[in-house]
Amino acid sequence: MKKNYLVIVLFAANVAAQQSPGGVSSNLQVWMKADAGLTTSGNNITAWKDQSANAFSPAVVGGPPQAGSFINFNPVVKITGSDVTGGYFRIPTNAPNFSNMNVTAGSAQTEVFATVFSTRTANQYSAIVTKNSGGFWDGITLANYNISGTTTNYRTGYAVSDWLSDGGSTSAQQTIDQTPSKMFLLHGGNTQSGSTNTNRLRVNGNTATTNNSAFFNPNSYDFSIGNNSAGNTQYGFEGLIGDVIYYNRNLTPAETQKVNSYLAIKYGITLAANNQSYTSSNGTDFWTGATGPTATYNNNIFGIARDDAGSIDQRQSQSQNTGIQPIMTNGSGSPVTTNTAASALSNDISSSIIGSDTGSTAYTTPITGPSGIVVNNRTQRIWLVQEKTGTVGNVTISFPISNTNQKVYLVRSSNLDTTFDTTDTWIELTNPTVINGLTYVSATIDFADNDLFTFATFKSSPGGVATGISLWNRADAGISPTTGSITTWTDQALEHVATQQGSNATPSVIAGSKTNLNFNPGVNFTVNTQRIGNISVQTVNSLDYDIFNVTKNGISGVAFFGIARNNTTKDGTNYDSPHFEASGTIAMRDTNGNLDYYSGLPGGAYSASIPTIGYTQVKDTSLSFGRNGAITNQLATYGAKGNITGGYYFGRNADSPLSGDDGGFTGVIGENIVYSRTLTPVERQKVDSYLAIKYGMTLATSAAPMNYLNSASTTNTDNVVWTGVGNTTFYNRVFGIGRDDAGGLDQRISIAADPAAIITLSTDTDFTSQNAPTTTHPAIASDKQFTMMGDNNLSVTAYSTPITIGGKTMNRLPRIWRAQDTGDMGCVNIRMATNVSGNIIPNPGTGSLYAILADDPNFTTNVSLKKITYSATNIDFAINFNANSNNNYFTLAVLPASAVPAPVTGKIVGISTVNDSWQPTTNNTYLELRSQKLGFVISRVTTANRLAMIQQPGLVVYDIEQSKFFVSNGSVWRELGIDNTKSSFCN
């Protein structure tokens, strides 16, 4: 029994010894990891147990620090609040095993690893890991100092010495720009040899910076995480902490790489290119860096791996670099919210690690899919898979989408083949899942070593104009969340992500409605301090560029959109290249900050009654502007402005971190588009057409009407969906519904953006719900189907125009509507409001009210009438307009009561064939009614029975399922009374 018991104890001890960061256990004195040892009350951390053999139990001081945050799906500790109020952790000198941390004076060696993200904005020191005197910071110090007033730039240092002043003279320091990532791996170390003490600091495994300074013995001081050892209130750390690891010896380069690999895989960190191999605890590579293919695909590295001795159990992973990043999950299914919720890898020392090139994640590279797969572009970015150790099997790859109707395909090419074509593996991503506020779709695949993959989709662009687009912000796509205050606004061109800037609140989403952007949502700035933007990207990459912006009527204040000349200058000269103001003023500066133009627009401020489509043409030496499709007016000429390299913002640019001098605005933005080139006139007309149909706008004027084009147009006269040229009479309140997949248009409900508009079109009888991004309106059946409409701008307040139809004199409204069908859309639903102020349609009184429809505005050709019931609010009906024609006219008319004859009573009504030339036996008739006592009976059948009948010309039946009469021409049924060759009422 004793022998068996001894075996068990030794086995357990061996397992415990195997668990260490990267398998490096010798002289491991402190190992704090946020995924183990935490005790919480709610999210308040009450204890955090050390995982080294010393098993320290640090005291929780102040705060307390918080649980509940995650980086790469692993828990991290969050410290918030200024200074000590956020809390920190302390191992006191009287703790059991404390002396194990001591170093030997004269030959002292230390290594400290910490994964952190700093959020302190005060220009003050933040102690991350310390074992120092507190008051004078003598001893071990890993700390940073905010140098930007934002969460962007920190000067970070490590020293085992006296931290003098800012630490610059005694510590090894690096400046960290936190913009590219959500987590950083800090590695400080020192080596003392007699009187020489060398301090070192690495960030994400890069080349160490060094500083020789006098050694100061840390042995007699507390070990603290999140403050200095004395706990001075002004030096508290704020931000996220994942792991903290302390060795009191120097690690070999191979050992250092193992620890770095453990931390990088766990937290989705891309190691520096000069030191990029991800190594397992047994020394084999999970990912061999900077050689062969990894020299190209050495960006955005992440992956799943299992290494029992190295304490790696990463089951789901995503690069923590900013921007759009895929997620990899072990096994088949969907992404999960935490690492432990995914299934564990089956085999020890197994991995699947992914890196990418530097291409954009925007769908900008043309590609052709296999038969049945409709795509036109793939992401510019390509990812490499390395499975160098063990067997992983199926993994799930997930990628974000901007709307749930988007079809995305994972395209896998084997053996480093960079040509993606129809011979590769194509898998549709499905099963939308929301992770951290973004919607991802997923595909399951079993990768092989050196596979490449990318993502393909059918990518739309405004009006089908894709070349040179560099920014496309839509209020109906890319916004998260879709209700309430916005946290991210992803542009649909290059997928730049706009976020909160500083402490200024962000705008919110306002739903689309009849009075808000033609049933499309908008981004609503309710106070002039709100803003959202991205001041880390380059908005334009050309000296010449075009800008479209759509704003709702009624905006007020100052700046609503602007482009920065660069991303480093933080003052009032930086955000005007150009910027646009609600008053109509445009400001334009050159690359040096000199003001080239600052003045209002021709025609004055933006309209108070209808939205505005603004078009600005920026050239290196001139600035021009046109609104709502009208020709551009040159506003200014100036000397060459130079290259503009800055980001962009919506709203206020004053206040940190932008620190400009322009106030914000109040109002609603619908859309904003930037092209890094000058569009041709036809291209501009296509973009204007897309925006005009979407927002119910009439382009130009009735005196100079324009054709509305679809995405296939190559001139201003082909693929016209609304003929404006030569149509001055009916070029008022132009609007419509339509679908143009390549052009980014899916307008299912519409009303003209005009206070006098009274007609709403819809794909169903719901005339109030918004159009996008979530809609209950049925989809338009086919690509490039449109129903467009305009009117003659005459009165609707009296039935004052006589008209004769079928020998009866009626009185119609002077206003006539003209409709143009493209693609044979079929029945469209129409609501005519009768109660619009200044345009109230009167009650017909004792007369009978009819909607009348014809192929001409005089109502003489192919006339149809539908008797309707007057309502003091709305009149609803549906029309199937002539297919692919603009010969469709309708209005309302009243038949006076005096023109309606009395009903016929007491007489036999029938058909007589008294003329000998009309006989049942001749070939000029097929219907005979002969009955003295019995009525004429129509067969009543189901739809299935009707379709199965042997048809004869003139056969009439009643379909009891559809409640309609049908007549056959011998081969095809049509509804009785409906002529499929001309426009007609549907209901």
Image: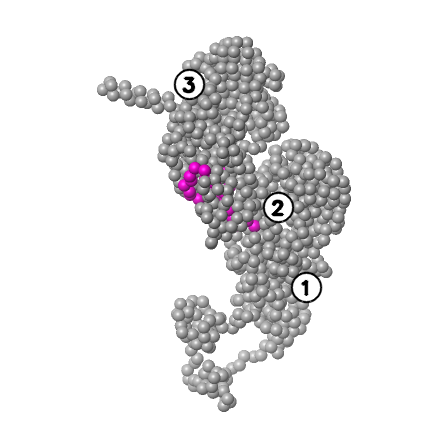
Seen at 60% across and 41% down, the residue is 507
Q: Amino acid at mark 2?
A: Ile
Q: Amino acid at mark 1?
A: Asn
Numbered disc in front, either 1 or 3: 3
Q: CA distance from mark 2 to mark 3?
A: 56 Å
Q: Nearer the viewer, residue 793 or 318?
A: 318
Q: Nearer the viewer, residue 106 or 602?
A: 106
Q: Based on the picture, tell me whether residue 487 belongs to the magenta stretch.
A: no
- Residue 39 sits in quarter: top left
Extreme residue toward the left, this view: 1
Which element is circle 1 on?
loop
Q: Is residue 456 visible?
A: yes
Q: How many marks?
A: 3
The numbered mark at residue 469 is: 2
Q: Can you say whether 162 is above or below 851 in the image?
A: above
- Residue 729 sits in quarter: bottom right
986 left or right, relative to 887: left
Which element is circle 3 on?
loop
Q: Which residue is mark 1?
A: 727
Q: CA distance from mark 2 to mark 1?
A: 32 Å
Q: Give the percent coordinates (x, y) of residue 620.
A: 72, 42
519 left or right, relative to 932: right
Q: Earlier in the sequence, mark 2 or mark 1?
A: 2
Seen at 72% across and 35% down, the residue is 593
Q: Based on the picture, tell me whether residue 457 belongs to the magenta stretch.
A: yes
Q: Can you say whether 784 is above or below 538 in the image?
A: below
Give the position of the N terminus as an image quadrant: top left
Seen at 46% across and 81% down, the residue is 926
Q: Give the percent coordinates (x, y) of residue 642.
A: 71, 38
Q: Which residue is mark 3?
A: 26
Q: Amino acid at mark 3?
A: Ser
